[in-house]
Amino acid sequence: MTEFVGLISIVLTIIFYYGAKALYSRISFVLLSPLLVAPFVLVSCLLTLHISYSSYFVGGKWLTLLLQPAIVAFALPLHKHYETLKKHFPEVILSVIVGVFFALLSSALLGLWAGFAPQIIESLAPRSVTTPLAMTISNNLGGIPSLTAVFVILTGLLGIILGPLLIRLLPLHSPIAKGVLLGTGAHACGTSTALTIGSLEGTIASLAMIFAGLVTIFLSPIIFPLLLKL
Amino acid sequence: MRRMHPKATIFKLRKVLIAMVQIGALYCFALAGNYLAEVLHLNLPGSLIGMGVLFILLHLGIVPYQWVVSGGNWLLAELLLFFIPSVVAVMQYKQLFRQEGLALFLIILIGTVIVMVSSGLAAELILNKRWGKTL
């Protein structure tokens, strides 16, 4: 029975994903992103049929597992655009450091202002970084990794909506700045949005995403305890 | 439904199989990365180490681009699919979101705007400084 529910879970997730993707290709409205529509339909189904998340995840984990080779696959655009990356390395790394600093600062200040427990704030801190890295960092800081995974995905969702909006509002002209904004602000979700804008934007975004993860790993244990004392 | 020519079907099937083998190969890089992280006590996810190793091998020409490109591009194109189970997981945190939902939502929203604006503007500023306004 559990295997059956698991199998149905995978099939339905794939069907709803491709359905939502087809819808999004016709109506490119940010709130109709496949990452919002497909989970919304799935959660509605699970709640109506009284199926728990753990039963769903028996199947769902196989899709989550594919994230690992997908992260490895980011080596492809990095290799293909190596010359561009080499040329723009300084501006990408510097602006990512700026972004990471503001991510940690905003998490600490806003979290303290909302009166959250330190453990929740530490779980919020690495939310702009891709999930496997964010969970590692959360654990290092003293947060709750599974809660961080939820904050990461919410950041991704909001990033998909906010990213294109901010790109239109801000005086950004270069594909480099657009890629940095999406990759630093919304990890792999932002990177997939950047890939739909252009191949250069996507490559820079994947580079920014990777740097943001690495910079956060090294900076957060030094800066974050100090920020929490503010 | 339009029937495909048998040869075209076989060709398509071959392409799918090649992509699947390549995805398997990319997954092996992640597994090798996990192993390296454990042995060398690196505080990094294996998939990221795997990415670094693959990048170096591609760059040195040890692994030809063609060996991983069709599987890799499929994974990158359908990236959002692999995030869906994690989004569905949010339903487990009903309690937390009922109590602190609005504050958490606002913090993540404001925080994400701050990160995006600061990093995007910094990049544009540094680009203009370094390459001039013409870029």
Image: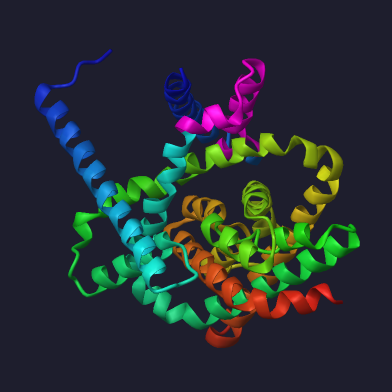
Residue B70, compared with residue B110, is above or below; it is above
Residue at image location 28% in from the left, 55% down from the top: B28
Residue B65, compared with residue A41, is above or below; it is below
Q: Could you tell me residue A201's position as x and y percent?
A: 49, 62
- Predominant secondary structure, magenta span: helix
Q: Could you tell me residue A157's position as x and y percent?
A: 64, 46
Q: Could you tell me residue B118's position as x and y percent?
A: 70, 71
Which residue is at the far left? B7
Q: Is residue B135 visible?
A: no
Residue A62, compared with residue B8, is above or below; it is below
Query: How many numbered callouts?
Result: 0
Q: Could you tell me residue A114's position as x and y percent?
A: 89, 57
Residue at image location 60% in from the left, 35% down from the top: B88
Bounds of the magenta span?
Answer: A31-59
Residue at image location 35% in from the left, 63% down from the top: B35
Whether A51 is among the magenta residues is yes
